Amino acid sequence: MRIAIAEDQYLLRDGLVRLLESQGFEIVAAVGSGPEMLAAMREHVPDVSIVDIRLPPSHTDEGLRAALTARAERQGFPVLLLSQYVEQLYASELLADGAGAVGYLLKDRVFNSEQFVTALRQVAGGGTVMDPEVVTKLLNRNASDALLGRLSARELEVLELMAEGRSNNSIAASLVVTEKAVAKHINSILTKLELPPSDDDNRRVRAVLAYLQR
């Protein structure tokens, strides 16, 4: 798998390169700004790009803007965004095109190499990955919503795992229940939240996050 990295902090950028190369990935570019990331994407056509949201020169959302431009030029281009903080707007903008192959992780996840590499592979394969802390904060911000209030405690647990991009099998293993029970909970959740049922993980995640961001 060919990867481009856009991260302005040299030590983290170098650490990402070393980590991913040790896992057998090919790093085609490691740059420190949004414009450089776009140039690398156009020149090397990587399979996936890892992008820090805050890049020079503005250090605000330069990385996010570069990622959105890249996905506009190459529909469905896989991008895994890294952020120091949870920002609901970033999650919303990243998912807005509905194409999948996107991820949003807090930088702390990089230090768990197994979790980080798994998330990267999932995004590169067209999946949607949201950091558990991002999902939890979105849930907490919307806890008073009338529709969310319809859910049972168990359904809230399932909803959070769904929003992380987990499969039914993964949710079942995490909660120590059967896949049949998970499917029943999901159908109930989508009905209570007035969202159409779907077996497609990306559509489920987008539907849940779209609801949480209302």
Image: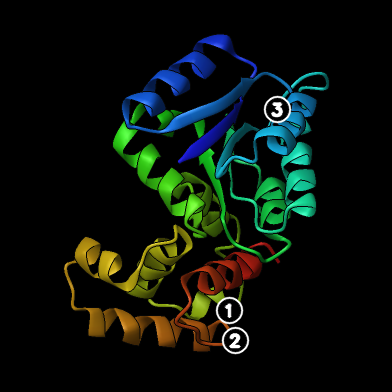
Q: Which residue type carries mark 1?
A: Leu
Q: Where is residue 179 in the image (x, y as percent from the top left)?
A: 24, 79
Q: Which residue in the structure is indicated by mark 2?
A: 194
Q: Quadrant location of residue 120?
A: top left
Q: Which of marks 1 and 2 is nearer the N terminus?
A: 1
Question: Is the residue under label 2 in contact with that under label 1 (CB below 8 Å)?
Answer: yes
Residue type, mark 3 in image: Arg
Which residue is identified by label 3? 54
Q: Is residue 48 left or right of residue 182?
A: right
Please state the horizontal and vertical placement of residue 101, each as a whole percent of the image: 57, 56
Q: Position of residue 128 (x, y in %)?
A: 52, 58
Q: Which residue lies furthest to the top in this view?
A: 11
Q: Residues within 10 Å of mark 2 (few under 14, many from 20)?
A: few
The quarter holding residue 155 reads bottom left
Question: Residue 78: x and y, percent?
Answer: 59, 50
Task: Compute the Cα span from label 3 to label 2.
Answer: 35 Å
- Whether residue 81 appears in this view of the structure is no
Tell which circle, 1 or 3, labels the residue nearer the N-terminal end. 3
Instruction: Name the residue rendered at 60%, 55% in the picture.
Output: 141
